[in-house]
Image: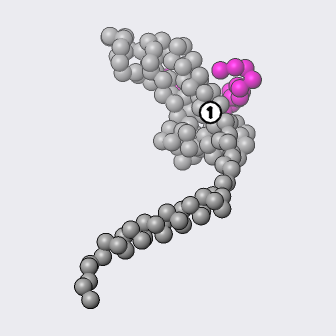
């Protein structure tokens, strides 16, 4: 991600906890807490309202009712690598939240398009009317 797209995360908004990880590592998994649970207080980030709403949407179940985003990283076998991974994922999530969706431009059909639609309906109606029962008077 380019430096211009980065949004600094203050250290006082983060809380890290190291927990036992599942996955590769052999007996080391049972002895060392290598997985990282990163908690970020969203209210301390000072986000714009649109970015907060988008972040809440993107985070989904990772956001708690108390306004914290919880990211668990256990992809790697070392604490430091998992720590860097969790922080990178958080920064990526915040950067995505700052991307605004383009405004939708309302369009309406032209008079000619409306006329073509009505003509097609009339033509179809006459075809269907011709399929009625044949009456011999």
User: Residue at the spot x=66%, y=62% of the render?
Assistant: 111
- Asked whether the viewer can see residue 74, the reply is yes
Which range of residues does the magenta coloring cover? 1-18
User: Residue at the spot x=56%, y=61% of the render?
Assistant: 116
* Spot occupied by residue 2 in the image (x, y as percentages of width and height): 70, 20
User: Residue at the spot x=44%, y=21% of the render?
Assistant: 74
Q: Seen in the image, is 50 located left or right of residue 132?
A: right
Q: 86 above or below 45?
A: above
* Spot occupied by residue 76 in the image (x, y as percentages of width and height): 45, 14
Query: Which of the 4 image quarters holds residue 114?
Result: bottom right
- For disc 1, the marked residue is 96
Please tell me which residue lies in front, 126 or 24.
126
Please tell me which residue lies in front, 99 or 23.
99
Please tell me which residue lies in front, 45 or 135.
135
User: Residue at the spot x=48%, y=12% of the render?
Assistant: 78
Q: Seen in the image, is 117 located left or right of residue 10?
A: left
């Amino acid at each position: 991600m380019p430096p211009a797209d980065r949004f600094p995360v203050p250290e006082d908004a983060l809380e890290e906890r190291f927990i036992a990880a599942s996955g590769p590592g052999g007996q080391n998994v049972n002895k060392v807490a290598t997985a990282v649970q990163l908690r970020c207080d969203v209210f301390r980030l000072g986000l714009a309202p649109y970015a907060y709403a988008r972040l809440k949407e993107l985070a989904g179940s990772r956001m708690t009712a108390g306004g914290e985003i919880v990211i668990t990283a256990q992809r790697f076998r070392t604490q430091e690598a998992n720590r860097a991974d969790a922080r990178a994922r958080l920064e990526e999530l915040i950067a995505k939240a700052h991307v605004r969706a383009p405004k939708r431009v309302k369009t309406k059909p032209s008079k000619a398009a409306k006329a073509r639609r009505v003509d097609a309906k009339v033509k179809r109606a006459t075809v269907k009317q011709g399929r009625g029962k044949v009456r011999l008077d």
